[in-house]
Image: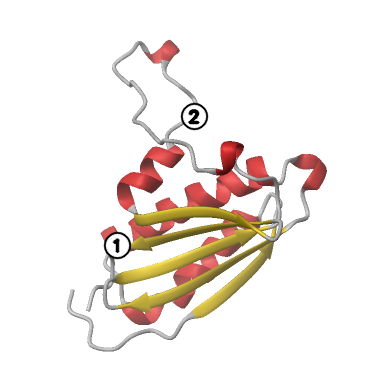
Amino acid sequence: MTQTTFLPAFHISVVSGQLAVRQALAQLLDGLKPLALDVEEAGTVELVMAEALNNIVEHAYPETDADGPISITCAHQKDGLHLTVVDSGRAMPDGQTPVGTAADIDVDLCDMPEGGFGWFLIKDLAKDVTYKRHNAQNQLRLRLAVALA
């Protein structure tokens, strides 16, 4: 897809909870409509961001801290979408993202892992994935090679 104009950067804010991921994804995809992403590109954005946001809701803000802020900044540049996700929840263990290795799925159905695919998907589909903890906030930055100019 050839893109000649860039979408201005935009910001999304939600509060962690049961509907946070759905609300954030709806706002993000709505904000990306001017780019006319194809189905595969939109699916990549939705999958990566759903995994990142679900991790925040489930791990950074466990049930006892469920009403924490989550913000997303999306900037469209020549090399794709640059996304920054910020929350004030618990820090990542060891101050870094999990390795994100592929789970072994060549096992009996009853032995299939229930989780552990998220960071593998994020790191497989996104580029330039970085995490840092700054001023009691988690900052996840990544680039999705979609809507390239």
- Horizontally, residue 2 falls left or right of residue 12, namely left
Residue type for callout 1: Glu
Image point (32%, 50%), residue name: 125
Q: In which quarter of the view is residue 148 placed? A: bottom left
Residue type for callout 2: Gly
Looking at the picture, does residue 100 appear above or below residue 72?
Answer: above
Image point (49%, 51%), residue name: 50
- Horizontally, residue 7 falls left or right of residue 85, namely left
Looking at the picture, does residue 130 appear above or below residue 112?
Answer: below
Q: Which residue is mark 2?
A: 115
Looking at the picture, does residue 23 appear above or below residue 51?
Answer: below
**SS at mark 1?**
helix
**SS at mark 2?**
loop
Q: In which quarter of the view is residue 63 placed? A: top right
> Closer to the N terminus: mark 1 or mark 2?
1
Q: Which mark is residue 41?
A: 1
Image point (47%, 76%), residue name: 31
